[in-house]
Every structure is written in structure tokens, then in C-alpha cells.
């Protein structure tokens, strides 16, 4: 058998691997050629008049803010006709290079009417491109000025005017003072007209109608007359750069793209605006083209034409209203002839004396309207209470005189007429005060100065300086809440006549009040409301509980003055206040000085009283409180009227005590005075009982031996809260303090409050102590101030520092005393070893052994311990 191995036959490779290298080189070379071609860009030539502001290698080419190339070189053109700028445009922007493409240089420009090219301040001058639509080209001639280009979507229309005015490219187009478009370009026509191409934003395009009229609102519009000078403008932007406004007729079709319109110099020349008609019985001094419609001092339209209807007492004035104010004219709107007014406040509408009369527009609610009547005086506002006052003598009352209630103007006299030797005043009260007009309301004419003197005191009433020219009418509201259906009331000559009138009056109001102090009150003593007698004291009697019950009678005309928030106080005799600043003596009236008296008033911030009380003074009557509840399981020392104090000042008191159902908890109801309850009736507030403390080491709260214990308080900063726990000891307010426990077989002379010393310096106190359940140890808790908690380490040692340490020897006696306080109250000292590194800081509730004495080496330890 032949054991020789068979030969291995290998196939010869057709292509050797070495040929891959030239193939890869060809591919890489082709890619590099393509990359160089694509990044090389397109070379173009641009002819400029000057090379000013153009720098080779720096000046860039932009299209709509996108960098598309850069200037490569700048050279003089043949025959010195400008300069040739050679630029390289990125390959992807090659499609923008057309035969009619436009180039121009952008530089910063600022003037009164135009600010442009500000971005060139940062990036430098640049060349802007506007692409054309022709064939590809690489040679161009630059423009000397930016072209007028219309870009963006919207409605493009054309305006025609006689001159350019203050308009420019970028001037705003306004509709009711809202910018809705802008001027894109302008040009001079063969007919010597100026045409403006404007663009309206797409969302506002529907506002331009085929009958729309445009007018120039550039600059200021000044109106100078005897009434003064009034200057108005569409906007600040239109003052600087010009502007155009337009209207939008509702019944007109929407304008089409490219439609032409006339641009008027102003609204008046456009004869456009909401047309209204005003009927009147005489011309009333109105002049077409000069009489204006005034709304809150602003001109909103003008009278365009006055027509006589064929009768001497029938005229119609046609007026045009600016479109932005057309919604003011509805079925309830009043048009009132403006008349001159002379008063102590000055002269108003003086132009109405000699110039064309104006019309005031008083807008109200209703449906849109175009027909109105001219009123010589304003009508009562919608919803107001209209009525008539009759009197024999108007003395100072005239059209426009105010109707006043408690110093507040609530209505007005519209007109005054003489009828059958009696005067009738057409008046009204505003809707919000209509409820004051009841079945027995009274009115009187207030004199400029009225003085009354009697035992009740001296009363002086004045309507102010304005009352000497135009007297106000005062309303005394009826005692009934029933609204009046009468349309006529009597105007009395003065207040006394109004009060004594025979109109229907109400029965007196009987009140029962309690007080623990009668003072000089007597039967018949006056009851005063703001020093005005409105009732009297009927009787009083002493009750079994020692309180005094007082019966009052409030006259029927004034019973409405007594409400749930009414407070009563003594107004008897003299109130004398003496201080370093001087002496103050006050009395309500001569009658109350003799008979005594009671005053009252309403106070909106006070709640209803369950039992009406006569307070000793107004100050006590108006004192405000907030009720809180303090709960404790130890009722010792808590009593009614126990004061609540903060830093020695009383801020409230305990008002009532009560136990829970299982008698385990005492709840002390208390009241906090205003404004203290804003800070002390919040979560985080603390309350604890303070008692007298007398020991060898201190004397604390000694005054409580006479006055009794009190509750101390600290303010909180949390949410409002009215329920708190009453603590039996001073709380720890140091949030960062350290609490550690010491264990000892006996407590010695230590006590709660004993000091904790470090190098004989107090750094804390003993704040709690307890006995172990098995009775083997005493545990004392130390409260180390947050500033010194870093001094306590895991290996710190504590010893009893109470009393005096005496050591006797042959050389004499060695006496050591930590402090006088530790001698009297006991104390604890501690020290920390000098180890490297220092032991870990102690944590809350760590436990240590209290040594009965110290080792001398402990006193030598003095490590440097950083917080």
C-alpha cells in the first residue's frame, strides 16, 4: 500500500490584490476633484460706482439673511468707470445668478424718517442679492440704491397721491390704529402723481374693500381754538415715518390684488366715516366743517352739512364719524350741545361763547344707530332714577348742581323750569344709588355756610367754595327700605326744615345695651351719631350680676343708622389727654357734659355682637380681635383674662376655659388683638406659660407674684392657624441646636436650666431630665447651641461641674470653681481630646456617661475645631 500523501492543487488568482491600490487611488482622486469643484464656488463680476465700504476677503454676499459668498478682489474697471468686484458665490446659490439679478451694497443708515441696515453695524457692510428670472449670467452692474422689492404674502394694492408727503418705504398701514401692512415702494408717474405699492398682511386682507378709502395720518393734527390747543396723532411711529389709515365699509365687496385707490390728505378730505344725522329745532351755533363731535375730550368726527328742513324750527345736521369710533353710536347714545361753564374750578368750553359750537358724545349701550336728536342737556343715564324736585326758591341751584349723599355725588340737576310761580328741577340719581330714594326721602338745599349753636354744641356745615356759585342738593334717605314710586319730591330750604317736614316718619327704635360702667349717664341723656343727636337714654337698671342694663330710643328718622356692625361708647363729660406734647381736652357736646351721653357709629371691619355693649371709650369699642384656642394637659395657673404677651407687651388675653369630655385636656379660648393676630395666628407660632421663678441663681418674672402668670408668645411665619398647644416651658427656638443625653447614677445639684460649659464658657443648658424605667440611671438631655455643636465629638467627655472642688495637701489648699452659676444651680462641663484626625461630630440623641469629677489632663486639651 502506498502511504505517500496526495499533492494539493491551488487555483491561480486571476487578479492580483496589488491592483486594488491604483483603483482606490483613482476613486479617491475623483472624490477630491469633485469636492474641490463643489467647494470652489462660482466666480462672478459686479461693477460698482465706488469701492467704498467693500473689502476683499471680508465683505460677504447675502440673500435674505443667508451667507452665499464673499468678495475675493476689487480692481479698477477699464476707462476708470467704477470698480470691478470679483466675488465667489457658493455652488448651491448658483441658481440665483440670472441676467436680471440685482446687487447692491447694504450700509447702516439712520435718519429722522428711516433706520435701516443696522445689522451691518455688527457684521460690517455686505452685498445683498435679489434674484432675477432670466438666463444664467456671471457679470452684473450693481444698483446705487436698494430696489423697491415687494416680498411676502398678502394683498398688494396701489395708492395714488399728489405728493410723497411724509411717507417712505416701510411706512405703516393702519386700520383702527392697528398696523396691518406697510408701504413696499413708491414711484413717480408720467402724470406727475406719486404711486405707492402697499402690502396688507394676509390675515387683514379682507378688510380692504372695493369702496375703501385711504388717507394720510402722518405727523400731528393740531386743533387750535379758544378752548385751547389739541394735538393728536395716529401713533408715534406714524409721526416719525409716516402712515396711512383706511376704512372698511361693511356692505362692500373685498378688493382684488393690484386694485388702485386714491390716497387723501386726511380723513376730512376723504369724506369717509360713519354718516349720522342729527335733528334739532334750531341751528344752535353749529357750523358745517368746524363743529366737531367730542368724546371724552377727543375729536371723533365733524359736522359736514346743515340742512333746513323747510321749517324755521327743524334742522338736520349731517356728520361723519371716524371709523374707529363708529361703535360708540347706538340707540342709547346722547348728543349734547356743549355750553360754556364758569365756576371756581375755572372756565370750561370758552370757545362756545364766540366760536362754533361743539357736540359732546355720551356713549351708552344699545344697537347701532344713525339717527339722533341734539339735546341741550344730557339725559339721565340708562337705569338711573329720574324725578322732579319742586321749590319756591332755588337760591344757588342751577342746571348741573350735584345731588349729594354723605359727601358723595350721586346725581345731578338736568334742567330747571319755572311753572306757576314755582320751580321744577328735573333731576336723576345714578343707577348704583337708586336704592337710596325711598318713600320718605327728603331733600334740602345746602347753604354755602350754615352755623347752628345750642346745648348740643356748635355745628358748622359748609358746601365748600364751589357752593357759593352752585349749591348742592343734599339727600336725607328715608328710614324705610321700600323704594319710592313718587316722581315728585319737595326741595326744602335747609336741613332743619327737611327733618321737621310732615312727610311720613318711622317709629323709634328701642335698644337694650349692657355696661359695667354707668359714668354720668342720666335719663334723657343724648345718643349721638357723629355728634348729631339721634336719640336719647330712656332708662337704666342694675342687674343681679352687677351689670347695668340701659334702654335707648333711636328716633325713627335715624333707625337705619343702627346695624350689625354698630358699636356704642360713653361720650359723657370731658376726655382729657395729657402728655409731654401738650394737653388735649375733648367733649362731644355741652348737653352730654351735663347729662352724660352715648355715641355710636358703624365700622365695616367689625362683626356682629351677640349682646350690644356700651364701651368706656371709642378705642375699646373699635378694638378688633381674632379668636384662637390653646390646649394643655396641665391646667395649673391658667385663668380667665390671663394676658398673652410678646416681649413684655400685651397682645391678647384668655377669655374662656373649658375641659374636653374626658377631662384630660384644658382648652383656653383666647383673643388676639389687631394687628398682632396677623403674625401670631400662624403655624409656627409658639405659646408657653410664664411663672415666677426665685432661686439663688436668678429671680424671674417677679411681677407675676402680684399680677399672676401670663402666656408668652413668639410669632410664626406659616399659614393662618387658630389652634395651638400651650407649652409648660420655654421652647427651644434654635433650630440647629444639638441634643445629646448623659447617663449618671445620680442627678446631684443639676436642674433644668443648669449651664453646659466648654472651657468655663456657657454653650448650652440642661433642658430635660428623666429616670430610667428600671430606676438605675438618671438621663439628662443637653441642648447645645447651634453655634457650638461642632465642639461635641464622639470621644468628648462630660463631668459634673457643680459646687466647689477643694484639694488639700501639705502645700496648702487648691480650690477650683467653674462659675458662680454652677455653684448655685449646678452645671456640666465637657472637653474634647486633641486627636488627629478629630473624632466624628456628635449626632442628635447620642449618649455619653456623666463623670462625677474630672481628670487634670482633660483640662489641658485645647484642640482647634472648625465648624
Image (cartoon, grey):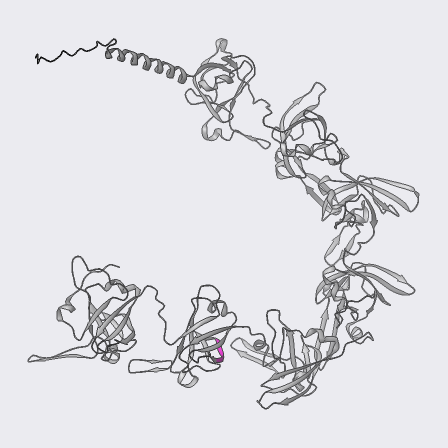
In this rendering, is residue 450 above or below 105? Answer: below
Visible residue check, residue 162: no
For the magenta stretch, what is the residue range? 652-657
User: Which quarter of the image is occupied by the C terminus?
Assistant: bottom left
Which residue appears at 71% of the width and 49% of the height? 296
Q: Quadrant of residue 443?
A: bottom right
Q: Quadrant of residue 412?
A: bottom right
346 sits to left or right of 705: right
Residue extending farthest left: 810
Residue extending farthest right: 311
Between 744 and 414, which is closer to the camera in this rendering?
744
Where is residue 513 shown, x and y percent of the image?
Answer: 63, 82
Residue 656: say if magenta.
yes
166 sits to left or right of 18: right
Q: Main secondary structure of the magenta part?
A: strand
Visible residue check, residue 371: yes
* Figure disc tally: 0
Which residue appears at 24% of the width and 59% of the height? 866
Q: Quadrant of residue 147?
A: top right
Where is residue 792 shown, x and y percent of the image?
Answer: 23, 64
User: Which quarter of the image is occupied by the N terminus?
Assistant: top left
In this rendering, is residue 109 above or below 56? Answer: below
Where is residue 217 shown, x and y percent of the image?
Answer: 68, 35
Where is residue 336 shown, x and y percent of the image?
Answer: 80, 50
Residue 138: say if magenta.
no
Between 85 and 642, which is closer to the camera in this rendering?
642
Amino acid at each position: 500500500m502506498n502511504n505517500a500523501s496526495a499533492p494539493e492543487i491551488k487555483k491561480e488568482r486571476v487578479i492580483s490584490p496589488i491592483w486594488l491600490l491604483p483603483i482606490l487611488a483613482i476613486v479617491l482622486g475623483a472624490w477630491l476633484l469633485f469636492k474641490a469643484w463643489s467647494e470652489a464656488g462660482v466666480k462672478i463680476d459686479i461693477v460698482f460706482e465706488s469701492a467704498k465700504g467693500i473689502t476683499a476677503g471680508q465683505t460677504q454676499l447675502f440673500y435674505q439673511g443667508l451667507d452665499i459668498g464673499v468678495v475675493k478682489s476689487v480692481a479698477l474697471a477699464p476707462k476708470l468707470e467704477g470698480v470691478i468686484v470679483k466675488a465667489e458665490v457658493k455652488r448651491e446659490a448658483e441658481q440665483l445668478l440670472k441676467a436680471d439679478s440685482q446687487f447692491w451694497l447694504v450700509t447702516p443708515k439712520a435718519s429722522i424718517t428711516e433706520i435701516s441696515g443696522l445689522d451691518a453695524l455688527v457684521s460690517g457692510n455686505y452685498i445683498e442679492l435679489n434674484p432675477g428670472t432670466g438666463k444664467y449670467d456671471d457679470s452684473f452692474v450693481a444698483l446705487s440704491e436698494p430696489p423697491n422689492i415687494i416680498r411676502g404674502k398678502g394683498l398688494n394694492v396701489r395708492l395714488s397721491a399728489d405728493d410723497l408727503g411724509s411717507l417712505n418705504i416701510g411706512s405703516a398701514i393702519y386700520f383702527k390704529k392697528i398696523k396691518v401692512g406697510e408701504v413696499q415702494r413708491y414711484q413717480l408717474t408720467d402724470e406727475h402723481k406719486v404711486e405707492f405699492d402697499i402690502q396688507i398682511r394676509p390675515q387683514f386682507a379682507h378688510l380692504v374693500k372695493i369702496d375703501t378709502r385711504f388717507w394720510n395720518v402722518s405727523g400731528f393734527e393740531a386743533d387750535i381754538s379758544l378752548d385751547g390747543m389739541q394735538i393728536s396723532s395716529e401713533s408715534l411711529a406714524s409721526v416719525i415715518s409716516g402712515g396711512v389709515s383706511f376704512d372698511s365699509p361693511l356692505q362692500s365687496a373685498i378688493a382684488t390684488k393690484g386694485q388702485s385707490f386714491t390716497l387723501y390728505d386726511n380723513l376730512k378730505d376723504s369724506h369717509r366715516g360713519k354718516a349720522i344725522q342729527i335733528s334739532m329745532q334750531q341751528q344752535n351755533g353749529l357750523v358745517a366743517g368746524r363743529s366737531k363731535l367730542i368724546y371724552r375730550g377727543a375729536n371723533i368726527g365733524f359736522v359736514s352739512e346743515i340742512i333746513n328742513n323747510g321749517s324755521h324750527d327743524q334742522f338736520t345736521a349731517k356728520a361723519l364719524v371716524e371709523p374707529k369710533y363708529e361703535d360708540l353710536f347706538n340707540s342709547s347714545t346722547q348728543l349734547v350741545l356743549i355750553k360754556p361753564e364758569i365756576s371756581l374750578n375755572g372756565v370750561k368750553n370758552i370757545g362756545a361763547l364766540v366760536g362754533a359750537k361743539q357736540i359732546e358724545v355720551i356713549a351708552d349701550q344699545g344697537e347701532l344707530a344713525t339717527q339722533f336728536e341734539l339735546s341741550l342737556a344730557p339725559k339721565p343715564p340708562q337705569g338711573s332714577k329720574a324725578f322732579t324736585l319742586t321749590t319756591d326758591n332755588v337760591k344757588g341751584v342751577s342746571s348741573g348742581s350735584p345731588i349729594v349723599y354723605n359727601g358723595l355725588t350721586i346725581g345731578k340737576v338736568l334742567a330747571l323750569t319755572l311753572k306757576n310761580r314755582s320751580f321744577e328741577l328735573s333731576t336723576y340719581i345714578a343707577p348704583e344709588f337708586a336704592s337710596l330714594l325711598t318713600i320718605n326721602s327728603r331733600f334740602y338745599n345746602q347753604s354755602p355756610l350754615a352755623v347752628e349753636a345750642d346745648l348740643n354744641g356748635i355745628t358748622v356745615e359748609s358746601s365748600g367754595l364751589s357752593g357759593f356759585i352752585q349749591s348742592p342738593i343734599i339727600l336725607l334717605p328715608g328710614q324705610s327700605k321700600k323704594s319710592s314710586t313718587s316722581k315728585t319730591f319737595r326741595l326744602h330750604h335747609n336741613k332743619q326744615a327737611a327733618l321737621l317736614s310732615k312727610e311720613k316718619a318711622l317709629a323709634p327704635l328701642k335698644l337694650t345695651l349692657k355696661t359695667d360702667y354707668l359714668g354720668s349717664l342720666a335719663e334723657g341723656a343724648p345718643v349721638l351719631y357723629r355728634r348729631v343727636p339721634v336719640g336719647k337714654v330712656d332708662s337704666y337698671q342694675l342687674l343681679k350680676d352687677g351689670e347695668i342694663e340701659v334702654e335707648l330710643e333711636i328716633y325713627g328718622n335715624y333707625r337705619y343708622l343702627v346695624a350689625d356692625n354698630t358699636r356704642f361708647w360713653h361720650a359723657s363729660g370731658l376726655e382729657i389727654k395729657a402728655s409731654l406734647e401738650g394737653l388735649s381736652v375733648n367733649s362731644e357736646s355741652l348737653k352730654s357734659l351735663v347729662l352724660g351721653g352715648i355715641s355710636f357709629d358703624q365700622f365695616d371691619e367689625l362683626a356682629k355682637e351677640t349682646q350690644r355693649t356700651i364701651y368706656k371709650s371709642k378705642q375699646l369699642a373699635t378694638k378688633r380681635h381674632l379668636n384662637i384656642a390653646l390646649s394643655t394637659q396641665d391646667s395649673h395657673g391658667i385663668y380667665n383674662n390671663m394676658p398673652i404677651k410678646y416681649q413684655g407687651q400685651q397682645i391678647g388675653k384668655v377669655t374662656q376655659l373649658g375641659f374636653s369630655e374626658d377631662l384630660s385636656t384644658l382648652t383656653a379660648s383666647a383673643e388676639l388683638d389687631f394687628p398682632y393676630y396677623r403674625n401670631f395666628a400662624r403655624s409656627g407660632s409658639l405659646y408657653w406659660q410664664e411663672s415666677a421663678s426665685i432661686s439663688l441663681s436668678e429671680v424671674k418674672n417677679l411681677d407675676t407674684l402680684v399680677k399672676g402668670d401670663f402666656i408668652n408668645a413668639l410669632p410664626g411665619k406659616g399659614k393662618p392657624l387658630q389652634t395651638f398647644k400651650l407649652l409648660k416651658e420655654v421652647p427651644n427656638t434654635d433650630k440647629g441646636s444639638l441634643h445629646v443625653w448623659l447617663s449618671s447614677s445620680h442627678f446631684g445639684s443639676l436642674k433644668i436650666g443648669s449651664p453646659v460649659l466648654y472651657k468655663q464658657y456657657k454653650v448650652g443648658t440642661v433642658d430635660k431630665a428623666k429616670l430610667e424605667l428600671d430606676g438605675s440611671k438618671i438621663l439628662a438631655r443637653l441642648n447645645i447651641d447651634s453655634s457650638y455643636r461642632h465642639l461635641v465629638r464622639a470621644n468628648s467627655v462630660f463631668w459634673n461641674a457643680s459646687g466647689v472642688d477643694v484639694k488639700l495637701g501639705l502645700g496648702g489648699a487648691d480650690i477650683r470653681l467653674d462659675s458662680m452659676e454652677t455653684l448655685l444651680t449646678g452645671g456640666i462641663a465637657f472637653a474634647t481630646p486633641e486627636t488627629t484626625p478629630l473624632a466624628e461630630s456628635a449626632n442628635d440623641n447620642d449618649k455619653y456617661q456623666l463623670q462625677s469629677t474630672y481628670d487634670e489632663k482633660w483640662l489641658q486639651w485645647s484642640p482647634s475645631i472648625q465648624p
